[in-house]
Image (cartoon, rainbow, N blue to C red):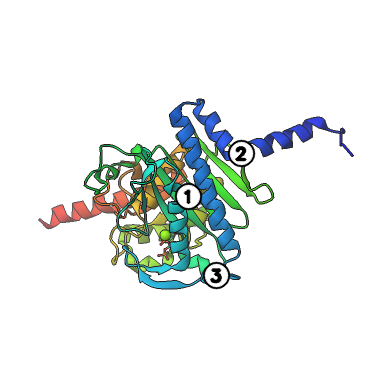
Amino acid sequence: MVNNQQPEIQEHYLDRDCTTLSRHVLQQLQSFSPEAQDLSAIMNRLALAGKLISRRLSRAGLVENALGFTGEVNVQGESVKKMDVFANDVFISVFKQSGLVCRLASEEMEKPYYIPENCPVGRYTLLYDPIDGSSNVDINLNVGSIFSIRQQEGDDTDGEAKDLLQNGHKQIAAGYILYGPTTVLVYSMGHGVHSFILDPSLGEFILAQENIQVPHHGPVYSANEGNYWQWDESIREYIRYMHRHEGYTARYSGALVGDFHRILLQGGVFVYPGTVKKPEGKLRLLYESAPLAFLIEQAGGRASTGTQPILDVVPEELHTRTPLAIGSTEDVQLVESFIADWIRRKTDNEAIAK
Ligand code: AHM
Ligand code: MG
């Protein structure tokens, strides 16, 4: 029986269900130019990669060879998980024949993957972290994929991808896919931040929220306090300040994408500073920090190394790491103020000692 009771409500839901990712991208770009068509097609491919990874994760405990380690160590010196390899290969398979990209650079590969000569080559480069938070995979907790799109500059005939060693303002688009109770894709092309939820019955990412704005301040701070004695004094002072003041609460999931998503929607700050063992921290600029910095700035927030905006950092090499403080403007500024204060005191003390 047809329900004619509330046609406007029905129309609203149908409209929402029809706002798929690719339609949204074209609306955002307000154009059907070849560039807009390419970017829309890239987002579609990213959505396909997200669906394939989401499907694998949802059945990981039931299929052979989905969980656990491969026994290999990656370029970062980290043990590789089978899911890292699977997800890395998914992005390559999805883009190899697409004619949209010329290279794919991943956290899991020492050098970029160049599209072979017998395949159509596009003008864009995809940079990605196939599985972010992979320590969560084997225990059925949320993980994510992070992506960033840049245009190739120059011909890169030596295969060194030197044009990728530029700051984060060069990103054309960035986003992530969060594999949680639902699979969520969040992206920005420099016109706001928008989220989509995968509707498994349709196999489509459907618009959930448009123009997300991060609150100016939030209660959450997200840091691995297990590193407390590895941090320098400025960060320890900051954490002690958070302990002593009311209105703050800690949340840390072990997957940056999950922690970031919470902060994007509810406010707060994620902090991964340098440690004694890793003075530049753990997070990779091109695959993790810069794409999320692009998103948070689009959402009205802030991303910093503690002393410099993340988007201004020029990497020395493809796998350069940076300390990261990201989230609500006020909360990131608080972290920066502790670092600035500590640098000032150190400089003063050094001057006195001379
Ligand atoms: P990964 O991409 O190899 O999983 O590493 C990045 C992850 C982030 O998702 C997370 O915030 C961080 O590493 C956790 O590291 P730690 O266990 O040192 O707190
Ligand atoms: Mg990773």
Amino acid type, residue under disc 3 in the picture: Ile
Estimate the x, y position of residue 156 in percent, counting from the top left: 25, 43
Above or below: residue 83 compared with residue 106: below
Label 1, label 3: how far apart the Cα atoms are: 27 Å
Secondary structure beneath label 3: helix
Residue drawn 25% across the image and 48% down it: 159
Residue 320 lies in quadrant: bottom left
Badge 1, how many Cα within 10 Å: few under 14, some, many 20+? some
Cβ of mark 1 under 8 Å from ligand 2: the answer is no
Residue drawn 32% across the image and 53% down it: 322
Residue 167 lies in quadrant: top left
Amino acid type, residue under disc 2 in the picture: Thr
Secondary structure beneath label 2: loop
Secondary structure beneath label 1: helix
Question: Of the numbered discs in the image, which one, if any, rests on residue 20?
Answer: 2
Can you identify the residue that label 3 sits on?
A: 139
Location of the C terminus (image quadrant): bottom left
Amino acid type, residue under disc 1 in the picture: Val
Viewer-proximal residue among 67 and 237: 67
Viewer-proximal residue among 180 and 351: 180
Please indicate whether residue 215 sits to the left or right of residue 126 in the image.
right
Question: Of the numbered discs in the image, which one, if any, rests on residue 94?
Answer: 1
Please indicate whether residue 287 sits to the left or right of residue 142 in the image.
left
